[in-house]
Amino acid sequence: MFFGFQGNKMLKKSRYIGILYFGIAFLLAWGGFISHVKAATLSTSPASGTFTVGSTFDVSIYLNTEDQSVNAINTALSFPPDKLQLVSPSTGKSVIGVWTAQPTVNNQIGKVELQGGVPGGIKVGNGLVTTLTFRVKSVGTATIKFLDNSKVLLHDGRGTDVLSNTSSGIYQLVLPPPAGPVVVSQTHPDQTLWYSGKTVTLSWSAEEKVAGYSYEISQDPVGIPDDTQDSDKSSVTYRNLSDNIYYFHIKALSGGSWGGTTHFAIKIDSDPPADFPLKVIPSARTVRKQPIFEFQTTDKNSGINHYELKLVNLKEGGEQPLFVETVSPYVPQELSPGEYLVLVRVYDNAGNIREVSQKLEIITSAFQIVGSEGMYFGEKIFIAWKWFWLVALMVLLGLFFIFKRIKFLHQNVEQKRSENHLPDNLKKQLEELKKYKSKFGTLVVFGLMVSSFILGMGKAVEAADSLSTPVVNILSKELSNKEIFYVGGRVEIPETEVSVYLQNTETQETYTFESKPDKFGEWFYRHESFLPSGNYVVWVQGKLQSAQSAPSGQLNVLVKKQAFQIAGSRLSYELVYLVFVITLVLVVLILFVSILYHSRQLRKKRALLNQEIRQAEESIKRGFAVIRRDIEQELSLLKKSKGKPTKEEKEKESQLIKDLAEIEGRLEKEIWEMGET
């Protein structure tokens, strides 16, 4: 038994181990199958190269199926249309047996699409799909890449996509080598780069036997100047050129004949990138300490190079942070509550800058008063003051009406109790009881108390010859008289001191401040106190040793009144509206508590009044019962009297019997119905 038991345990254990091994093997096999299935590759050949403007070159597309059988290809490639033109896609020699659609070419957007099939499937290690012929249009770097919708379908009856990798081609496009004078540019030295300067200076080597030169500037990369001599000098300057790609062409006249032509590329982009919004998520006023900044723009000529961002704390002093290169979206480190200025700069490939700014306020609670505008509840719900006060007035009027009504009822009940007031039907019953009392003698005396409850009332430039004028690119153009004024910009020479002039256009009072740029030439000034409300103009001037720049143009600044100022004290709208809101809340609380108190008292005194009325009802019933007893006794005495009754006695007996019947009828039914007081 012992060995049999042990043998069963070992058998079960071996089964578990076998299942485990089988599972591992299955997973490995499945993983290998998956990795094996997703293995086809599309590539370009050559993958790189250098080609001259005006020439053509071929790019071949190759397929590697990685020992899989595939039967269809659907691929799309993109290329820069400003630099390349697709002359023709070849559908001749190819592993594709049937082209299910003719190749689609779009030279305006730079795209080519190919779609074909292989009946019966094919396995290739380096099969030629097609050959594309491109013509070089301009200098620069061109990338030919496969788009994400490219597919290679497995010959499995289900059309499984097995494309796992693509290889793009990157090509350098240059002008033909100089066949004439060697040309250089002091202003635009690198033919592959973009420059913001619109003035171009070109010079070339001068030879003794050269009589003159013919040259021109155009947008044709391989243009040839005419055979007319333009100058015998070795340099030329073009001014105020518009943004574009230009080509300078020159040839020399020597020994009565013209030589070969040299081509030189010039790229000009003087416009900054397009203006763009700086979006703060969830909002520019938030309790979140790590908001998200989103920004994106384009540049029509040279293209976007990079973005830089800076966060300026508007409430704290100290050294200002530097711009840091970043991408969108950007999440800062955790920020402390306060006001910030978010600055984002975008640079294009010519060095032009576009800068946008956005105020950010990190608040400490989900309830916040926004000056004279309104209140925030949470991060996104905003209620303007006009709607807040309208709702508050309606609430106050409603509570006041309820209060007055309950107070009136309270006083009414109290008055009834103090005046021993009885309902009309009870008064009628009491009068009848008195009438019978006058006849028969007994009446139960009782008191009745009455009371009531009433509702009571209980609450937001031009440069100088010696020194260039500082550039202003950061300015708080509109702010309130409870916000700090700030201004900033750049100077060409980091050692330049910047004088900031601020003048009130109404009082003509002028302030002067100084700011020192950092090592990158960035300067920033933040005022230490609040400015009085009004209109201002601001301008700046640079100073370096004894040299001074010309003053910059005047910029307008509006300081809006968003705080009350009494003598030397300043009360912000937030504080004033907060006092009003607190007062309103207190009034509402007083009204609410008063309503609760008087409602409770009204219920209690109403209950007392109803109890007293019921007691009065019982007393009247007892009074009628006593009178019935008296009548019955009187009748009994009449019946016991000897002799024949007189006429008076008969009439009295008849009246007693009638009164007795009426009283018994009253006692058989309820004589008092409780009513509302």
Image (spheres, rainbow, N blue to C red):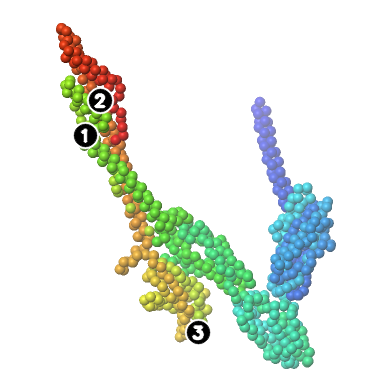
* Sooner in the amino-acid sequence: mark 3 or mark 1: 1
| Measured Cα–Cα span from mark 3 to mark 1 | 102 Å
Indicate left or right for 517 with 591 as reference: right
Residue at which label 2 appears: 618
Amino acid found under the numbered disc labelled 2: Glu
Residue at 79% from the left image edge and 58% from the top image edge: 101
Q: Position of residue 448 (x, y in %)?
A: 22, 32
- The relative height of residue 185 versus residue 127 in the rendered view (above or below) is below
546 and 197: which one is in front?
A: 197
Dot 3 falls on a residue whose secondary structure is loop
| Label at residue 464 | 3
Q: Is residue 260 left or right of residue 411?
A: right
**Nearer to us: label 2 or label 3:** 2
Q: Which residue is mark 1?
A: 420
Q: Which amino acid does the dot numbered 3 rest on?
A: Ala
Observer-nearest of 446 and 166: 446
Query: Percent position (x, y) of residue 207?
Result: 72, 90
